[in-house]
Every structure is written in structure tokens, then in C-alpha cells.
Image: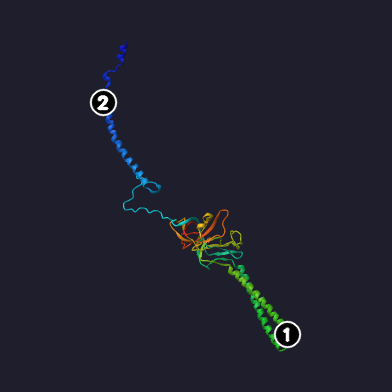
């Protein structure tokens, strides 16, 4: 019985042989897929070697050029030049603001009403040009009054001079007493003093009339127009903040510009008076201007730990505008 069970478990020789057709089918499929796989892997590996070679060739650890996405430069195109070294020779670079060396706010000398303004913001003005006129009706009336008093006193002096002359002749002829001569002389002296007072009042009234016509004190540009015709204006208070109607115009010479900067106290040893500088406005970084350290403040700002420096700009042009920011390179001494 055991022998029959063993025979039942025995594998027959014809079952040990695999079908040859299945084996050769697998071989043909592998042979067909292998060349396609090789063709796909070879370009990818080549690109990876190119990227690795480019990364090794760039100095300073720069970013490599992607040969798959970056197009090659056209034939005959010159290579792009590197950006200029704007801080060449600089020992310190600080940012500041462009300012006019002299900003003048024209204020009236007395309380008055604006009658006419002949300029607007951005206009060019010359030294002595009439820019504002105040209402002078009251002051012209005072001028006429002073002129009348002046003429009256002149007539009184002339009358006293004639009277004194006649009395003097009578005294010499013993026809008039000496006391009459003294009285005539004193009356002439009093009228002459009154004439001087009248002359002073006339000059003062004329000065007020002249002050109603306001001139530009410099050659420059109108930065601000602070009032309009019909507004009441008053002189600017000394030491106080400017109110809305204490100044008429703000003018400045845009050919005389500086850069105002605050320098950290740790960098002050790198700056000296008359040191050469290079100024570059932030709005036009490709433009540079020669400069010179013109002013070093005598007192530091303790709260900020800085000292104010002013750099004079040589030959400014229309690209430089007050209150715009600028970069200053302090050049080595």
C-alpha cells in the first residue's frame, strides 16, 4: 500500500520539461525592450554630466547654467559685461538725502493781505524778481499823510528862515532887540526839528509801501507756494514752528545741492573734512557725481549715536531733486 502511495506522488518525466514556446516568448520581449531603455537613459545621463561639469566650472560657487532651459547666445553676440563696481576705492558707503544748501522761506515783514502772486511751484526765479505783492492801500494813505506833513514843515522852516534873517538885519541896525533875535532863532530850530520828524515819518511810510512788493532774494526755483491771493499773512515767529500763513514762498538754488547723512560714531574715523566722495542717487543708480565733505556737525546725536555729515555735490543737474535719497561712497584718503 505504501508503494502505491509513493508512485502516486512521483512526478512523471514529461511533466518536468517546460514548454519551450513560453521561454522563447519571454526572451524576445526582453530583447525588444532593452534597446529602447538604453536609448532613453543615455541622453539623460549626458545632461546630468553637463550640469555637474558646469557647476564645477563656475567660480565662487555660482549657479550653473541649465543647458536644457537656457538658450545658447546667438552667434556674434558679445558677452554681457559685468556690472560696474560702484564701490571701488570706497572706505565707507552711507545713504542720505539730497537737500538744497540754502532753502529760503520768504516771509512778509508785517501783517498784510496777499494781493498778487506771480510765480507757481517749480518756476525759476532770479535775484530781485518781483514774486508777491501785498495790499498797500493803507500804507499808501499813510505815505500821503506823511508827505503832506513833510511839505508843511518845510514851508514853516522856510518862513522862519526869512523871519530870522530880517530880525538879524534889524538887530544890526539897532532897530530890534536881541531877545527878538533869540526868539526867531529858536523858532527856526524847532521847525527844523519838526521837519526832520516829518521826513522820518515819510521815509517809514514809504518803506512800508516798498515792503508790499516782495522780491526773490536769490536765483533759484520755487519749491513751495504756501499762500494764495486774498489770504492774510503775518511775519514768521522767531524760534517757533511755521504756521500755515507765516511764509509766502519757499525757494532754493538747485545748482547748490548737498547730501545730508547721519554717520554712525563707529565710522567717524573714516571721514575727514574735504574728503572726496562719490554720490549716486537711488532713482538713477547709473549716474554718479563727484562730491566733497563740506560740513561735519560739531555735536553728535546722543540718542541715535550718529553725527550729521553734509557732502557738497559738484555740478548737479536736473536728475538731482531735493529730498530724494542718495548713496554716498567715501573714497580712501
Q: How crowded is mark 2: few (under 14 residues within 10 Å), some or many (20 or more)?
A: few
Is residue 122 visible in the rendered structure shown here?
no
Is disc 2 placed on a helix, strand or loop? helix
Q: What residue did someone put label 2 on?
A: 21
What residue is at 26 percent from the left and 26 percent from the top? 21
- Could you say where residue 196 lies in the image, as x and y percent from the top left? 65, 75
Q: Is residue 169 left or right of residue 98?
A: right
Above or below: residue 162 compared with residue 1:
below
**Observer-nearest of 270 and 325:** 270
Residue 67, quarter of the rendered image? top left
- Could you say where residue 41 lies in the image, as x and y percent from the top left? 32, 38
Residue 289, quarter of the rendered image? bottom left
Is residue 172 visible in the rendered structure shown here?
yes
What residue is at 28 percent from the left and 21 percent from the top? 16
Above or below: residue 217 compared with residue 308:
below
- Upstream in the sequence, badge 1 or badge 2? 2
Q: What residue did someone put label 1 on?
A: 178
How far separated are the C-alphas under marks 1 and 2? 170 Å
Amino acid at each position: 500500500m505504501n508503494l502505491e502511495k509513493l508512485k502516486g506522488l512521483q512526478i512523471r518525466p514529461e511533466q518536468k520539461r517546460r514548454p519551450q514556446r513560453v521561454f522563447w516568448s519571454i526572451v524576445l520581449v526582453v530583447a525588444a525592450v532593452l534597446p529602447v531603455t538604453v536609448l532613453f537613459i543615455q541622453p539623460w545621463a549626458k545632461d546630468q554630466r553637463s550640469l555637474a561639469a558646469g557647476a564645477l566650472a563656475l567660480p565662487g560657487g555660482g549657479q550653473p547654467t541649465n543647458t536644457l532651459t537656457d538658450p545658447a547666445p546667438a552667434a556674434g553676440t558679445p558677452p554681457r559685461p559685468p556690472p560696474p563696481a560702484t564701490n571701488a576705492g570706497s572706505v565707507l558707503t552711507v545713504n542720505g538725502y539730497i537737500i538744497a544748501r540754502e532753502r529760503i522761506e520768504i516771509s512778509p515783514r508785517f501783517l498784510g493781505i496777499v494781493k498778487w502772486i506771480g510765480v507757481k511751484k517749480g518756476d525759476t526765479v532770479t535775484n530781485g524778481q518781483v514774486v508777491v505783492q501785498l495790499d498797500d492801500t493803507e500804507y499808501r494813505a499813510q505815505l500821503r499823510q506823511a508827505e503832506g506833513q513833510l511839505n508843511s514843515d518845510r514851508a514853516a522852516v522856510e518862513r522862519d528862515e526869512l523871519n530870522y534873517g530880517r530880525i538879524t538885519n534889524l538887530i544890526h541896525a539897532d532897530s530890534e532887540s536881541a531877545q527878538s533875535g533869540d526868539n526867531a532863532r529858536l523858532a527856526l530850530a524847532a521847525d527844523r526839528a519838526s521837519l526832520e520828524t516829518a521826513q522820518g515819518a515819510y521815509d517809514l511810510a514809504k518803506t512800508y509801501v516798498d515792503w508790499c512788493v516782495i522780491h526773490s532774494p536769490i536765483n533759484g526755483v520755487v519749491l513751495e507756494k504756501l499762500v494764495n491771493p486774498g489770504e492774510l499773512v503775518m511775519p514768521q515767529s522767531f524760534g517757533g514752528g511755521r504756521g500755515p500763513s507765516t511764509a509766502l514762498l519757499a525757494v532754493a538754488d538747485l545748482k547748490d545741492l548737498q547730501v545730508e547723512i547721519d554717520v554712525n560714531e563707529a565710522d567717524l574715523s573714516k571721514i575727514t573734512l574735504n574728503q572726496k566722495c562719490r554720490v549716486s542717487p537711488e532713482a538713477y543708480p547709473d549716474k554718479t557725481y563727484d562730491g566733497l565733505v563740506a560740513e561735519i556737525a560739531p555735536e553728535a546725536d546722543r540718542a541715535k549715536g550718529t553725527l550729521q555729515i553734509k557732502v557738497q555735490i559738484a555740478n548737479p543737474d536736473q536728475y538731482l531733486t531735493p529730498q530724494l535719497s542718495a548713496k554716498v561712497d567715501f573714497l580712501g584718503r
